[in-house]
Image (cartoon, helix red, strand yellow):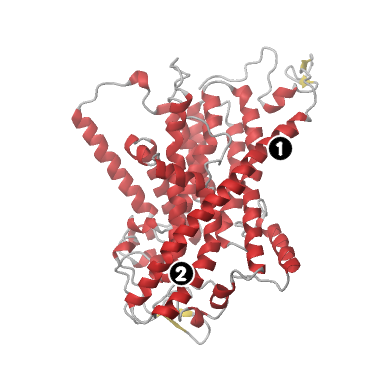
Amino acid sequence: MPLSFWKRHDSDLESALPTAGAEQHGISHQSSDNKKKNTLWLDGLRGYAAFFVFLGHFGSLYWCELAMVYATQVPQGTTVPSWFPYGENTPNGERIAGPSDQKNSHFIQMPILRLLYDGDAMVAFFFIISGYSLSIRPCTLIHQGRTTELLPALSSAMLRRPIRLLLPVVVSTLLIALLFSVGAFSPAMDIQNGSREEFHKYFHGDHKGKDFLVQPTLVAQIEHWFLSLNDFFEFFTQKRYPNSSYDGHLWTIPVEFRCSVLLYLTQMATALLDVRVRLAILGVLTIGAFTWGDAFEMALFWAGMSLCEIDMTYRTRPGDKKRTDRNRVLIRGFGMTFALLCGLYLASYPRHFPEYTPLFSGLAAIGIPGASSFGQWRFWQGVGAIVCAIVVSGSLTVKKFLSNRVARYLGRISFSLYLVHGAITRGFSQALSVALWRLIGKDTPMQYNTVVFLTFIPTVMLLFAASHGFCTLVDEPIVRFAKWLESKLKSFSRPQVEWEKLPSDDHEDEMVGVARHDSCYGLLETGNMQTHVRD
């Protein structure tokens, strides 16, 4: 999931969120510190989401039930995935739900609570966060009428975006390949690469099959890793979700990049439009992507941009504050709380068997027009994430919680945590659990769950140590490298040459000549031509 999701460095465009409509109404802008405080919640939300993704992938090793919501009862004979714990294998190789009692009655499976480990839902949050954060700087410039600075901002962001998103992935997957070659994954590989029956002698979770691509020599391993990047970097082909052979959790990264490019194009295309027109276009794009476009990821990016626009345009301005009576405050508080709970409930929509639980069967009966079976459950999770983001962006209380020191730290290491957690759970956690089960035993629920707990503690410690190390030694230096590379590339630019406007019989506004250098990084300025009318 991601991330996209993802990083506090998601965008060099990220800057302070100004007071809504301040420029339009002559209100002075907030200080730099206040602006940064207004967007800290994005980092905090991203940080918690990344940690919940880890919890989901860790838990899926040990408990298949986590994939289902409370009170799910799949009818006997229904075709089910290979991981389904209450199933039977048929002679033709299929797996069907059996007659055994399906014990999906754990409290942690309840809606909202299950978000603590639902990585699918966190992906929706990653994408809307990215859409919002990538829109802050462009929307700020548009609202302030500084459109000549918009192209430089977008050019800078677009130039650095692939470096900041993709180069850390190259490093993390290379490290995994090197760990493969030195045998660091050998204990876990014997279990994971074996049969489903062998895997389930120990683990009650999801068996992903042959998940360790170990080659006979170091050279062969590096060659295999290098060739695997070709599949991962397919951004604009018919392969919708390119993936890494070395870490399947990283499918969100190329999706983030592809959506970022489309979002930048949207910002440029709508820059000179009135804010109401821009919001209408974004609404149409979001609905279209959720339905017949069947592209939930892009819908969430556009929804994030829409929310950023709304925050800047329609949120209460300091100059408009009025004395509000206590009853109105209470009503607003109850309303926002109810909306947040509704959003969290929708985000809890399960990927598997929603039609077989009374908690979501009503929503499952509503077919989203144009969306595939994959897009059906992504739609409800996406709508839930949008509702939650709307509430959070308007709630000082929730923003304060998402801006505390713990949240800020999680936000700082969120991208690194997302990149390293897969190797840690697949390698270290599996190997440690097997060793402890052989020592303690696994025949009773108490023994099984005790080992899971004893595995979880050192896994979390290693996770944070590795995430912090990767953040400080790889991720943040790459951010600085991207800035350095941009400055070096710009140093090769040609001198400025002004546009000339020459008379033309057929096209009075035809522009001839070479663009002024600084205009190559901003909307083109011409003589008396007005480049922007303030929203």
Question: Where does label 1 land, which residue?
Answer: 485
Q: Residue 38 in the image: state x and y as whole percent.
A: 43, 32
Taking depth in this image into account, of 119 and 168 the one nearest to the observer is 168
Q: Quadrant of residue 532?
A: top right
Residue at x-position 54% and y-position 31%: 137
Q: Residues within 10 Å of mark 1 (few under 14, many from 20)?
A: some
Where residue 328 appears, as percent x and y from the top left, is 22, 31
What amino acid is at disc 1?
Leu
CB atoms at circles 1 and 2 under 8 Å apart?
no
Say which residue appears at 38% left-offset and 63% top-offset: 354
Observer able to see residue 381: yes
Q: Earlier in the sequence, mark 1 or mark 2?
A: 2
Q: Secondary structure at mark 2?
A: helix
- Image x and y of residue 110, in percent: 31, 60
Residue tagged by mark 2?
Answer: 61
From the top left corner, tell me how far across and down residue 5 is, in percent.
52, 48
- Distance between the Cα atoms at labels 1 and 2? 41 Å
